Amino acid sequence: MSVHAPAHAPQQSNALAGTALGVVAVAGGIAPWIAGGGILPVQNLWRTDVQRFQMPFSLLPVSQYYATSMFVLIVMGGVFAGIARHVLARTWAAWPIALGVLIGHVVVVTQSFIADARGLDLDDTRAWWYLGGLLAGAIIAVGFAQVGYWLISRASSGPAALGIALAAVPFAAWIGMWAQLLSGPMGIPQGVLLSLRWLPAVVVGLALAWCGVMPATRLVVWLLGLSALWIVPAAFTAVQYALGSRVLAGDLSEMAAAGMQVFPAALAIGWLPVVVAAAIGIVGAAPAAILRRQRGYGTRH
């Protein structure tokens, strides 16, 4: 008499593997920070004066000076998970991977903020505002990571292309972290800096070319992708300027005003990559559209 394994055994195996994949993707997202040592940045509101080498280990750079870096490290975990499912594991259920990403991020955020809270002077009200503000930002980043995962993991090229386009600026920043780490004290070479400046435009352009323009609803992907390429770098610049200013530290209204002042100025100089991305997308999508039209004409005649 033969003994058969339960029919649900493969599904359970894939669910566990998917959850593990999500956790691994989160580890990949924070990899450049960990490779650099993972030492918590020196804190302005630390209980005692310490040197950098005396700071504790942290899975995230919890600091107002690293706010955008922390956002990028978190978001890229979801992006990598989405790419992995789209390319390697389309037959796997989506939710276990999403759960793995969420579990990984909960662990990463919890460890990092506990490490920070243990050294902060919590008798100072500013420390609570500081910790709460950064934690809110981290939670928002976790949400964006889930959005990136669910978009990119879709089988349809439209949502996947949108997810990739939205992640282009964080991806370039993530690559920049590796470049900074590998360049050492000499700094990133000018050629690499130039490549990093144009990398988001190339990524968005290729994503739009892959997306195409048919059906016409795909034009929404183009609009959102190009808008993100224009707005996200300006938002990063404004946020980092507001949070990273020692002069404005602690004055929330002045920080917000400074950010709002920098944002339109950053927008005004950020249009050229949008043009380049649109050009790449059009050049890439046009041949596919022509070929599709020719095939449709051939089937009718």
Image: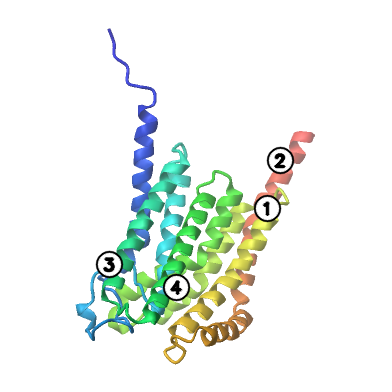
The answer to whether mark 1 and mark 2 are in CB contact below 8 A is: no
> At numbered mark 1, what does the secondary structure look like: helix, strand or loop?
helix
| Label located before the other in sequence (1 or 2) | 1
Vertical placement of 264 versus 154: above or below? below
Marks 1 and 4, how far apart in space? 37 Å
Task: Tell me if mark 3 has few (under 14), some (14-19) or many (20+) residues whose alpha carbon lies within 10 angstroms of its own.
Answer: few
User: Does residue 34 appear to the left or right of 225 in the view shown?
Assistant: left
**Can you tell which mark lies on residue 218?**
1
Residue 8 location (% of width, % of height):
39, 26
User: Does residue 3 appear to the left or right of 299 in the view shown?
Assistant: left
| Label located before the other in sequence (1 or 4) | 4
The amino acid type, in three-letter code, at marker 4 is Gly
State the residue position of label 3. Answer: 35
The amino acid type, in three-letter code, at marker 3 is Ala
Task: Tell me if mark 4 has few (under 14), some (14-19) or many (20+) residues whose alpha carbon lies within 10 angstroms of its own.
Answer: few
Task: Tell me if mark 1 has few (under 14), some (14-19) or many (20+) residues whose alpha carbon lies within 10 angstroms of its own.
Answer: some
The answer to whether mark 1 and mark 4 are in CB contact below 8 A is: no
The answer to whether mark 4 and mark 3 are in CB contact below 8 A is: no
> At numbered mark 2, what does the secondary structure look like: helix, strand or loop?
helix
Residue 243 location (% of width, % of height):
46, 81
The amino acid type, in three-letter code, at marker 1 is Arg
Marks 2 and 4, how far apart in space? 55 Å
| Label located before the other in sequence (1 or 3) | 3
Task: Tell me if mark 2 has few (under 14), some (14-19) or many (20+) residues whose alpha carbon lies within 10 angstroms of its own.
Answer: few
Marks 1 and 3, how far apart in space? 39 Å
Marks 1 and 2, how far apart in space? 20 Å
The answer to whether mark 1 and mark 3 are in CB contact below 8 A is: no
Residue sticking out furthest to the front: 123
State the residue position of label 2. Answer: 295
State the residue position of label 4. Answer: 133
Residue 106 location (% of width, % of height):
37, 57
Residue at x 61%, y 52% (from the top left corner): 211
